[in-house]
Image: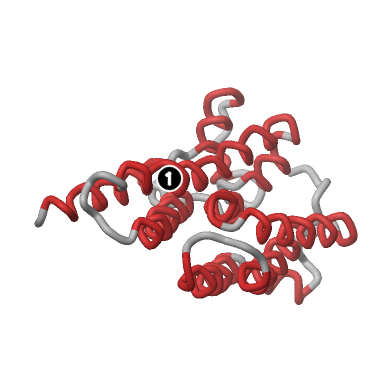
């Protein structure tokens, strides 16, 4: 392995480890003695924290989960600037993808995790903040009107690639493709929620577990 690839690959691993930090699991275990994998939806995302523990615990969890995606994209490319690795914008996308995968498949908790929405938002906050704002507006409107977080997340994921194409961003021409792939990934992660929505069985926000 050449020296020019060693640093980027180490940063990819570091991005995964940052994303893999099981924020909600540690909050549930550390402050409440609760394993969120066996409560509510069983998911380790902020929505389940809200459902089981309330908004006071869900809010810091979602903030940290966003930062897990934003930090590798914002800071790790800076370490490459003088390290002999080209294509730092492309590497930023790789770091972001690794952080999202870490959040969804954390080795700390048996390769389980959240569905990647907040961490994905953090990644794109570093790459295309205006697109994130547009997707967040869609998410907020849908959740307020329907009280379905999953529906808001799916529709926001669909809006994101269009917003990336339409609004200023970094990451070059590959970013819209990355956004499209991420949207499909988020929808796939919500496939059980979509099935419950179709059947009319999905839980609405505000219903405590």
Position in image of residue 110 (x %, y %) = 38, 48
Q: Residues within 10 Å of mark 1 (few under 14, many from 20)?
A: many
Q: Secondary structure at mark 1?
A: helix
Rendered residue at 44%/54% (across/down): 96
Q: Position of residue 203 (x, y in %)?
A: 77, 57
Residue positioned 31% across, 51% down in the render: 12
Please, which residue is most extreme toward the left here?
1
Colouring: secondary structure
Nearer-the-camera pick, 39 or 191: 191
Whether residue 81 is situated above or below residue 161 in the rendered picture:
above
Name the residue furthest top. 31
View extreme (front): residue: 82
Please say if 41 is above or below 131: above
Which residue is at 67% across, 71% downward?
166
Q: Foreground residue, 6 or 146? A: 6
Residue 173 seen by the camera: yes
Q: Quadrant of the C terminus?
A: top right
Q: Nearer the viewer, residue 22 or 140?
A: 140
| Image side of residue 176 versus residue 3, left or right | right
Q: Quadrant of the N terminus?
A: bottom left
* Front-lying residue, 23 or 128: 128
Q: Answer with left or right where residue 54 lies relative to residue 71.
A: right
Q: Quadrant of residue 145?
A: bottom right
- Residue 81: percent from left, percent from top: 31, 47
Is residue 126 left or right of 3 when viewed as pictured?
Answer: right
Mark 1 — residue?
A: 72
The residue located at (56%, 56%) in the rendering is: 124
Across and down, in percent, residue 88 comes to 35, 56
Can residue 42 be seen here? The reply is: no
* 103 shown above or below 97: above
């Amino acid at each position: 392995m050449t020296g020019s690839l060693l640093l980027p690959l180490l940063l990819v691993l570091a991005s995964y480890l940052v994303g893999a930090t099981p924020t909600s699991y540690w909050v549930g275990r550390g402050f409440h003695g609760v394993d969120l994998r066996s409560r509510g939806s069983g998911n380790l995302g902020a929505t389940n924290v809200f459902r089981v523990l309330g908004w006071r615990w869900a809010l810091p969890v979602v903030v940290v989960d966003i930062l897990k995606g934003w930090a590798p994209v914002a800071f790790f490319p800076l370490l490459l600037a003088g390290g002999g690795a080209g294509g730092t914008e492309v590497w930023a996308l790789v770091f972001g993808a690794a952080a999202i995968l870490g959040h969804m498949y954390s080795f700390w908790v048996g390769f389980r995790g959240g569905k990647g929405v907040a961490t994905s938002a953090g990644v794109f906050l570093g790459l295309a903040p205006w697109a994130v704002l547009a997707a967040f507006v869609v998410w907020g409107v849908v959740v307020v009107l329907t009280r379905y977080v999953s529906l808001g997340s799916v529709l926001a994921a669909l809006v994101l690639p269009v917003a990336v194409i339409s609004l200023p961003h970094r990451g070059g021409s590959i970013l819209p493709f990355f956004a499209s792939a991420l949207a499909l990934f988020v929808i796939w992660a919500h496939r059980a929620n979509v099935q419950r929505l179709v059947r009319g069985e999905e839980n609405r926000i505000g219903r405590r577990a």
